[in-house]
Image (spheres, grey):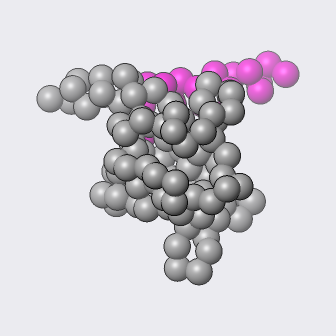
């Protein structure tokens, strides 16, 4: 129980403080893409990452969006927001299963702090 809380704390700390770069972790057949939203519409989300400048991931009606543990819609995801996209490889591309939305302010703070 305590171990789970410690792991959760550090995961939240990392999402709230550490600038996100591209990370593609294999987890249940999914890739996790981390970065900031460059563009989002009904069909796709484009994420700027550290390792690869931009990654475009398709969206469909089954894609779920979550912010602060609550369900939101694609319309609630602003450009510049930090995200972690859980995506499945489909053919040559990626399809988003879950988009976890972080704070835009933290992303801007890190960008400005690095100057």
Residue at (75%, 59%) from the top-left corner? 28
Residue at (30%, 23%) from the top-left corner? 109
Q: Report if residue 15 lies within the magenta region.
A: yes
Number of residue marks: 0
For residue 82, which quarter of the picture?
top left
Residue in the foreground of this view, choosing between 29 and 67 = 67
Residue 36, placed above or below residue 47: above
* Residue 32 appears in view: yes
Residue 93, position in %: x, y?
52, 73
Q: Is residue 5 left or right of residue 58?
A: right
Residue 18, position in %: x, y?
42, 31
The overriding secondary structure of the stretch rendered in magenta is helix
Q: Report if residue 17 lies within the magenta region.
A: yes
Residue at (25%, 31%) from the top-left corner? 111
Q: Which residues are magenta?
A: 1-25
Q: Quadrant of the C terminus?
A: top left
């Amino acid at each position: 129980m305590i171990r789970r809380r410690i792991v959760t704390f550090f995961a939240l700390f990392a999402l709230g403080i550490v600038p996100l770069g591209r990370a593609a972790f294999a987890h249940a057949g999914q890739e996790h893409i981390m970065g900031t939203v460059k563009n989002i519409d009904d069909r796709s989300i484009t994420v700027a990452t550290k390792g690869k400048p931009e990654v475009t991931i398709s969206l469909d009606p089954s894609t779920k969006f979550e912010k602060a543990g609550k369900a939101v819609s694609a319309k609630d995801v602003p450009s510049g927001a930090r995200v972690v996209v859980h995506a499945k490889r489909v053919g040559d591309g990626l399809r988003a299963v879950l988009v976890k939305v972080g704070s835009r302010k933290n992303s801007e703070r890190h960008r400005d702090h690095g100057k």
